[in-house]
Image: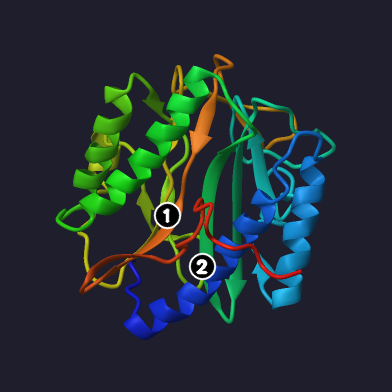
């Protein structure tokens, strides 16, 4: 069942979204060659703890509980990469995803960042990924049903010669990180049967994952990390977005914005 949020509740979600944006800004200051992924994760965890926010990924149920506060996925990794001792290298692309609950409400966002200069394919992926998420948010201004937004994303991605991952989808979000409805980044017969009306009070985590090559995915032996089956690169862009009487409102505003300031030390 869809849960609609009041404007007052949406304002509360903005506080959680702001912390997620600050966590991204903090991580962004660490995205340099030689930095260990686990050190980025530990910095985000310490920030959430200091702010009184609960990280939502750590302990998340699966074949094994998810062990970290962030998902940090490099290059051919699509999503759910577990941060460890691996170090960043020049030319990498890094997808960072994190979420928290603050005063009872959740925020969730992901962004893919370059480490220095990247090759032409990765640069194009970064540009198309950001454009796809922006196009989805723009489409929310006039669309009546989610399928219209999903098809808009498909047009951008397929027009660039890339593919949309279909194994993972976005989601409703509010007091819980995962709420109804499912929010696919694509549209096929199965997803069309679960299409939903866009209405004021919906809050959605919209998160296109875009592969340079095939859409096919495989899961590594850690039971979490999803990678492209053909080994080519992937990007992941996500905002939490509320539908209001004035149009879409980005709850996680600031994520991915290089001018958004990191939290004070």
For residue 48, above or below residue 160: below
Residue 184 in view of the camera: no
Residue located beneath label 1 in the image? 171
User: Where is the N terminus found, in terms of image quarters?
Assistant: bottom left
Residue located beneath label 2 in the image? 17
Q: Secondary structure at mark 1?
A: strand
Left or right: residue 128 compared with residue 72: left
**Of callouts 2 and 1, which one flags the residue occurring earlier in the amino acid sequence?**
2
Left or right: residue 16 compared with residue 136: right
User: Where is the C terminus found, in terms of image quarters?
Assistant: bottom right
Choose top left, top right, bottom left or bottom right for residue 152: top left
Q: Secondary structure at mark 2?
A: helix
Percent coordinates x, y for residue 252 in the rendering:
47, 63
Left or right: residue 140 compared with residue 59: left
Choose top left, top right, bottom left or bottom right for residue 19: bottom right
Camera-side residue: 229 or 211? 211
Percent coordinates x, y for residue 254 in the rendering:
49, 60
Local crowd at mark 1 within 10 Å, few (<14), some, or many (≥20)?
A: some
Residue plotted at (67% across, 55% down): 60
């Amino acid at each position: 069942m869809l849960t609609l949020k009041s404007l007052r509740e949406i304002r509360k979600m903005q506080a959680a979204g702001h912390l997620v944006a600050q966590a991204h800004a903090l991580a962004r200051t660490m995205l340099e060659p030689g930095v260990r992924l686990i050190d980025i994760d530990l910095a985000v965890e310490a920030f959430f703890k200091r702010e009184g926010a609960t990280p939502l990924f750590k302990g998340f149920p699966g074949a094994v509980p998810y062990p970290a506060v962030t998902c940090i996925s490099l290059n051919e990794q699509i999503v759910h990469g577990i941060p460890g001792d691996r170090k960043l290298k020049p030319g990498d692309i890094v997808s960072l995803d994190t979420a928290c609950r603050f005063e009872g409400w959740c925020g969730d966002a992901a962004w893919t960042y370059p480490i220095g200069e990247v090759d032409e394919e990765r640069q194009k992926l970064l540009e198309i990924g950001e454009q796809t998420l922006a196009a989805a948010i723009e489409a929310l201004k006039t669309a009546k049903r989610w399928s219209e937004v999903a098809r808009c994303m498909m047009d951008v991605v397929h027009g660039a010669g890339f593919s949309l991952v279909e194994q993972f989808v976005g989601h409703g979000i509010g007091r819980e990180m995962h709420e109804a409805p499912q929010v696919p980044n694509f549209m096929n017969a199965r997803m069309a049967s679960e299409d939903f009306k866009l209405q004021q009070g919906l809050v959605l985590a919209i998160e296109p994952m875009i592969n340079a090559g095939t859409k096919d995915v495989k899961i590594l032996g850690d039971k979490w990390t999803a990678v492209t089956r053909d080994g080519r690169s992937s990007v992941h862009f996500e905002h939490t977005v509320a539908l209001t009487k004035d149009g879409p409102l980005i709850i996680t505003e600031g994520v991915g914005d290089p001018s958004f300031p990191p939290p004070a030390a």
